[in-house]
Image (cartoon, rainbow, N blue to C red):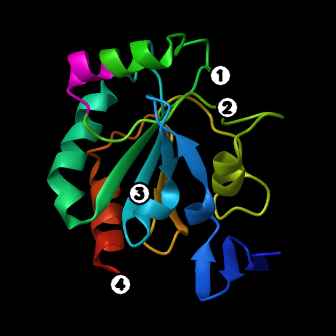
Amino acid sequence: MPFQVLTQGYLQQTGGFMSAFHTITLKALDGQELPLAAYKDKVVLVVNVASKCGLTPQYAALENLYQLYKDKGLVVLGLPCNQFAGQEPGSEKEIAEFCELNYGVTFPLGEKLDVNGPNRHSLYRLLAGEGAEYPGDITWNFEKFLVGKNGGVSARFSPRTAPDDPAVILAIEKALAQS
């Protein structure tokens, strides 16, 4: 067994510790692997997104955040989800085109996944499942989790909390300042 669970969210492997967050590999919209290990020592804002939602204009503020803080170590990770009123019905290609054409999105986008229910993706089991720092079902599109450099969740923001809300900015800046 290569990993031994030590405490909630952390694993020990030969050569040191690794957060459970960083062991997860997603797929990008283009089908390429998107290993979260690539974001070790970065702050990640994980957001379940949708292109036909009243909150879809948040893409613009998410892109602005990404541009403002990416050189300081922030990654915005958009994860499409069709579980809320079918508001993300498009194919991966359609989602990518929509985001690029309408909002100029350059931050990473994963392929569609379930954030709630029996098919909840392992990432969302870690972020919001039983034993998580901020447990509970995802309430709607554009719910946000701030993951620190160590892979631990440091904040959770409701869908209606704008990405440029002062509380989000403060949490990001605090997480970026931690070593």
Name the mark on residue 83.
1
Residue 98 seen from this side: yes
- In primary-sequence order, the first of circles 3 and 1 is 3
Whole-angstrom CA distance, mark 2 to mark 1, is 7 Å
Q: Residue at x 53, y 13 (%)?
A: 87
Question: In the picture, residue 41 is in which quadrant?
Answer: bottom left
- In primary-sequence order, the first of circles 1 and 4 is 1
**Residue 104 is a magenta residue:** yes
Foreground residue among 132 and 23? 23
The correct choice, above or below, for 2 with respect to 122 in the image is below
The amino acid type, in three-letter code, at marker 3 is Val
Q: Give the range drawn in magenta.
A: 99-105
Residue that badge 4 annotates:
179
The correct choice, above or below, for 38 with respect to 67 in the image is below
Quadrant of image for the C terminus: bottom left
- In primary-sequence order, the first of circles 2 and 1 is 1
Badge 2 crowding class, 10 Å Cα cut-off, few under 14, some 14 to 19, many 20 or more, is some
Residue that badge 3 annotates:
44
- In primary-sequence order, the first of circles 3 and 2 is 3
The amino acid type, in three-letter code, at marker 1 is Gln
The amino acid type, in three-letter code, at marker 2 is Asp
Whole-angstrom CA distance, mark 3 to mark 1, is 22 Å
Q: Which residue is drawn at 27% across and 54% down?
A: 166
Q: Where is residue 162 in the image (x, y as percent from the top left)?
A: 34, 39
Task: Say whether marks 2 and 1 touch (CB < 8 Å).
Answer: yes
Element type where label 3 sits in the image: strand
Whole-angstrom CA distance, mark 4 to mark 2, is 32 Å
Name the mark on residue 114.
2
